[in-house]
Image (cartoon, rainbow, N blue to C red):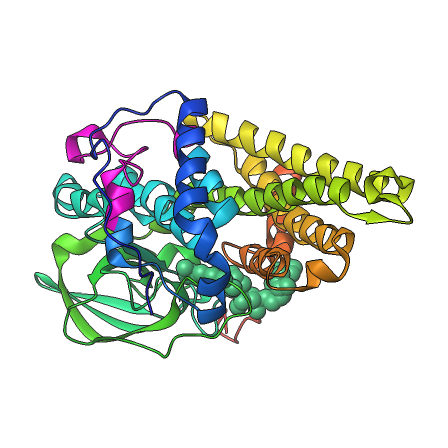
Amino acid sequence: MTTPLEPQPAGPGPAAQPTETSELREIARQVAEKRYAPHVEQWDRDRTVIAHDERRYLGSLGWLGIALPEEYGGAGGTFAEALTVVEELAKVWPPAAFQVFEANVGPAQHLVRLGTEEQRRRFLPGVISGDNAMAIGISEPDAGSAATDMVTRAEIKGDTVVVRGLKRWISNGGDADRYLVYCRMNDVPGARGIGAVIVEADRKGVSFGARERLMGFRGLPSADVILDDVEIPVENIVVRPPDGFRDLFSMFSIERLGNTTMSLALGQAALDKTIAYVQEREQFGRPIAEFQAVQVTLADMLLEVESVRMLRDRAVAGLDAGTPSTLHVSLAKCAANEMAKRVTDMAMMLHGANGYTEEYGLERMHRDAHGWALAGGTPDIQRTRIASELLGRSFDQRPARKATADGREA
Ligand SMILES: Cc1cc2nc3c(=O)[nH]c(=O)nc-3n(C[C@H](O)[C@H](O)[C@H](O)COP(=O)(O)OP(=O)(O)OC[C@H]3O[C@@H](n4cnc5c(N)ncnc54)[C@H](O)[C@@H]3O)c2cc1C
């Protein structure tokens, strides 16, 4: 099932210049409130997926290209502007926010920075207009946190690349038209054998698993992407080993700030709802906001949300200034993911039994918060990166490999 919304008159068009951030925030807030808020409860219950026409509508507003270059139809704006729209939409309906997220800080942004000019011309205009969506395939059944254990293989045979493997937990899997697939491109073990290619969904040999029934993320399809000797042209190679993986993971920092923003939005929305509720709801003849325990919880919620906002804003500012920091990104993602779980939980508690109903939307936010913490590297994996940055050295997470009699690694 997809969103049954009527087509809307087009917005200012994909080439529209970004407005001032506060103005952009207000427009995004109004779109979310008017267009999505009345339907969200039902859509979540039905696991309704965002319709392609709705994605095109977001494209017509110019939001799928805010941080993408003008020469391909984007607005050439900042990550801060793109993430402002992501936040406002995510407060109400994360599946719409996810389209803006994936277009501006996801795989399309990989192409801007790592792809060829021909790839940018071929793939970016469709993403910006909303006619196409790109998804990202890194995880596999036996390669989650240990992404460099991936076994999906891309073998170059003349002008063709043959891709074989299975990618798991792919958001927009089965719905996206193109997949940026991280894959092994030679026999070198670990990160130095990994590169990435673009696989179009309509290539022979591409198929998808059944849609996952996740705890949250119910408006976002997730499925295995099965690649059975899929032939693609060599022009679809985005990066090659030995340095491809390092470049891909520095790009993935940008994607992590999209994830951070989705978590921030959940925490902020839960806090906003709670501020209103505790002043309306009366017990013992007075609004519950007048009880000190409620005030303390409310203050804790604000502390958590504001701390994450500052961490997130610092990381985004670094990115926009051309000085991205792995440490700042991992601190922001780790804090945001854990904040969203805690703050949505506190919001449910302060709403009493109402917080436990689907009608108030808080249980949905809490379910989604758990998903964002898993996607893009868990909080504990962020902690290992934080410690590495802090101490200025990397720690091998693997047990030492035994050497064989002739001195090779087993
Ligand atoms: C909602 C959702 C959306 C997703 N979208 C995508 C997508 O679009 N594309 C994609 O490629 N993948 C996607 N993923 C997959 C996601 O990236 C992985 O789930 C994540 O990297 C964790 O891998 P895993 O689930 O295999 O858990 P595991 O790696 O098996 O981890 C299990 C537990 O062990 C802990 N752990 C593992 N290693 C260490 C270590 N060295 N130190 C400390 N703790 C450790 C983890 O923190 C975790 O708590 C998505 C997942 C979810 C839930």
Counting from the top left corner in percent of width and height, residue 406 is at: 48, 73
In terms of image quadrants, where is residue 167? bottom left
Q: Position of residue 372 (x, y in %)?
A: 54, 55
| Residue name at image x 46 percent, y 53 percent | 38
Q: Is residue 396 magenta?
A: no
Magenta residues span 56-83
User: Does 81 sit left or right of 302 as displayed?
Assistant: left
As drawn, the residue found furthest toward the front would be: 285
Furthest toward the left, the residue is: 159
Which picture quadrant has residue 13?
A: top left
Count of marks, rendered view: 0
Residue 381 picture location, percent across and down: 60, 54
Query: Where does residue 341 sit, x and y in percent of width and height?
Result: 66, 54
Q: Is residue 408 visible?
A: no
Above or below: residue 242 compared with residue 144: above
Q: Is residue 170 visible from the viewing direction of this image?
A: yes
- Image point (45%, 66%), residue name: 149
Residue 219 quadrant: bottom left
In the figure, is residue 30 to the left or right of 225?
A: right
Residue toward you, 29 or 230: 29
Of the pair 272 and 240, the residue shown nearer to us: 272
Is residue 73 positioned above or below 273 on the image?
above
